[in-house]
Image (spheres, rainbow, N blue to C red):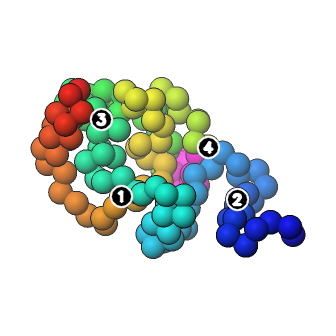
């Protein structure tokens, strides 16, 4: 096709899904994708910091649950819903403007499970936040 062998093809996904989150990716593949671009998955405390900041909020938007700020998990007939478009709930953004931190799809971090207790405060302190 004329493209260099080392250049990765950019996946396009199914028609009509350009704004959907990527799903059905293994942790191994997610790590390989990041490594290919010289990046890495976030640490758990980095992800939590991006979602909640350091002001004690429980949700990215504040202290209380608000189902209008994230995708429904099922419709009225209790039929599971697929992922929503990544920009479908802008009022659910974190203090840093990050979307879809709650309720759309699971996100990977460096480790499958990592205890994040108090690590947000330590991380923020290292940034002088």
Q: Earlier in the sequence, mark 1 or mark 4?
A: 4
Residue at the spot of label 2: 10
Label 3 element class: helix
Report how far apart the C-alphas of labels 3 and 1 lie in the structure: 16 Å
Relative horizontal placement of residue 83, taking residue 1 as reference (left or right): left
Q: In the picture shown, does residue 37 fall above or below 70?
A: below
x, y percentage for residue 63? 26, 28
Label 4 element class: loop
Q: Earlier in the sequence, mark 2 or mark 3?
A: 2
Please tell me how crowded label 3 is: few (under 14), some (14-19), or many (20+) other residues with Cα within 10 Å: many
Q: Which mark is residue 86?
A: none
Instruction: Considering the whole magenta stretch, tell me its main secondary structure.
Output: loop
Residue at the spot of label 4: 85
Residue at the spot of label 3: 52
84 and 127: which is toward the camera = 127
Closer to the eye: label 4 or 3: 3
Please tell me how crowded label 2 is: few (under 14), some (14-19), or many (20+) other residues with Cα within 10 Å: few
Report how far apart the C-alphas of labels 2 and 4 lie in the structure: 19 Å
């Amino acid at each position: 096709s004329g493209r260099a062998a080392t250049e990765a093809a950019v996946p396009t996904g199914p028609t009509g899904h350009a704004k959907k989150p990527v799903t059905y990716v293994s942790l191994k593949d997610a790590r390989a994708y990041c490594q290919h671009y010289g990046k890495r998955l976030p640490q758990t405390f980095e992800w939590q910091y991006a979602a909640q900041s350091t002001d004690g909020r429980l949700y990215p938007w504040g202290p209380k649950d608000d189902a209008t700020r994230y995708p429904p998990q099922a419709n009225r007939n209790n039929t599971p819903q697929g992922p929503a478009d990544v920009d479908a709930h802008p009022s659910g953004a974190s203090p840093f403007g990050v979307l879809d931190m709650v309720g759309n799809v699971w996100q990977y971090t460096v480790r499958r499970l990592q205890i994040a207790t108090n690590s947000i405060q330590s991380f923020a302190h290292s940034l002088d936040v």
